[in-house]
Amino acid sequence: MIIFRKRSKTIPIGNWDIKHFVVAYLNTQTASKQSHPLTTGLIVRGCYTYLMFEIKPLCKSDYDFAVELANTMDWHMAAEDFIFMDSLEPEGCFLLRDDTNPVGIATCISYGKIGWFGNLVIRKESRKKGAGSALVSHAINYLRQKGVETIGLYAYPYLVPFYTKLGFRSNINFSVLHNPHLSPISTKPLPTIKKSDLLSIVRFDQAFFGGNRKKLLQSIILDPNNTSCCISQDDQILGYVAATVYEKAAWIGPLICQSQRPDIAVALVNSVLSKLATKHVYTVIPQDSALAELFFSAGFSEDFFVTRMFLGQTSTKNCIYLTESLERG
Ligand SMILES: CC(C)(COP(=O)(O)OP(=O)(O)OC[C@H]1O[C@@H](n2cnc3c(N)ncnc32)[C@H](O)[C@@H]1OP(=O)(O)O)[C@@H](O)C(=O)NCCC(=O)NCCS
């Protein structure tokens, strides 16, 4: 995909934003490197100057750049994070280059009719020139081609206007909680989810999340380093939780539980917490979550909050919910 970026803005051009301007430009020109020499250099048109952007799937040789860029945001990412994203959604991680250099990244994932967008970063020197919007639009097109109807993301509050301009609408706020050294919790852990339970968990999850997260859930639940548990009654699942466990840290989520059963959600979280003593533990909960009190009394505190936004119809059904991650929902 080739896009042009706004390099300098000297005189306003009425109601046209960059997208309209580019569409108008592309309608009259052939936008490919081979057939139009202008696309490789500066394009001066009216009062705007454009340079070319190119967006392509992120490949292994780009991981060092992607990790370095992501970690300018203190996201503590490693190449394994992009390898994991790539295993779930080959072609769903993007690199944006300006004329010669890589300057931006973003990732997305499709779950049938629902998709999720995240990990958007543009190098500081290249911001406010249309690159961020270009990556979001590219991911939207990619997900639409995969049949996605609703796209979710978690936005820093100051970026809500940025995503609103691109069509996303705010839903609810989530707190990013962490406990740097979890104290032991004396609860007898619930049994781990078995491979044979996986399909029922996926169906239960889909009924609330709205999309089919099988590829994600099986990667987390079947990984022996991670931990998970569920509670069922008369063969009906009432709730489940999984946590991704690293050497010194852990991320609790996803969790989905029927909204009328906070007692089940508390039992699930206590079971997982009992396995994570001494670790640096993160989780992301809706600000009005029935689980907030439990996490605060276990020593968690809020780092910051984010706003869940959707492009398209809001997909989730009312339930008790912990995110799987900010970039995958
Ligand atoms: C968010 C980010 C990707 C935007 O990239 P960008 O290339 O600067 O975005 P664009 O140039 O396409 O901006 C499009 C519009 O959003 C506005 N905008 C961009 N960043 C903004 C910000 N931080 N605050 C408010 N508005 C912003 C721009 O002013 C522009 O509006 P305009 O068209 O009226 O001039 C970039 O600022 C960034 O990398 N930030 C740090 C990482 C981050 O926060 N990621 C998002 C996680 S939710």
Image (cartoon, rainbow, N blue to C red):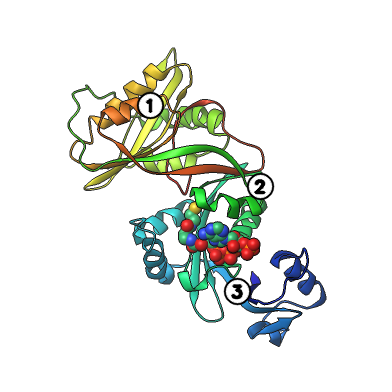
Amino acid under label 2?
Gly
Quarter of the image with the N terminus is bottom right
Please give the residue where the numbered disc 1 appears in the rendered image.
291
Asked if the residues shown at circle 2 and circle 3 are in contact, with their CB atoms under 8 angstroms apart, the answer is no
Q: Secondary structure at mark 2?
A: loop
* Label annotation for residue 265: none
Relative to 77, 261 lies left or right: right
x and y percentages locating residue 186 in the rendered image: 18, 24
Task: Tell me if mark 1 has few (under 14), some (14-19) or many (20+) residues whose alpha carbon lies within 10 angstroms of its own.
Answer: some
Q: Is residue 307 visible?
A: yes
Please give the residue where the numbered disc 2 appears in the rendered image.
147
Residue at image location 56% in from the left, 49% down from the top: 160
Residue 52 image-quadrant placement: bottom right
N-terminal of the pair, mark 1 or mark 3, is: 3
Relative to 147, 280 lies left or right: left
N-terminal of the pair, mark 2 or mark 3, is: 3
x and y percentages locating residue 299 in the rendered image: 25, 33
Residue at image location 37% in from the left, 28% down from the top: 292
Please give the residue where the numbered disc 3 appears in the rendered image.
53
Q: Secondary structure at mark 3?
A: strand
Amino acid under label 3?
Phe
The CB of the residue at mark 1 lies under 8 Å from ligand 1: no
Please determine whether, in this image, residue 144 is positioned above or below residue 240.
below
Residue 222 image-quadrant placement: top left
**Looking at the image, is mark 2 or mark 3 nearer the viewer?**
3
Q: Nearer the viewer, residue 256 or 122?
A: 122
Q: Nearer the viewer, residue 146 or 181?
A: 181
N-terminal of the pair, mark 1 or mark 2, is: 2
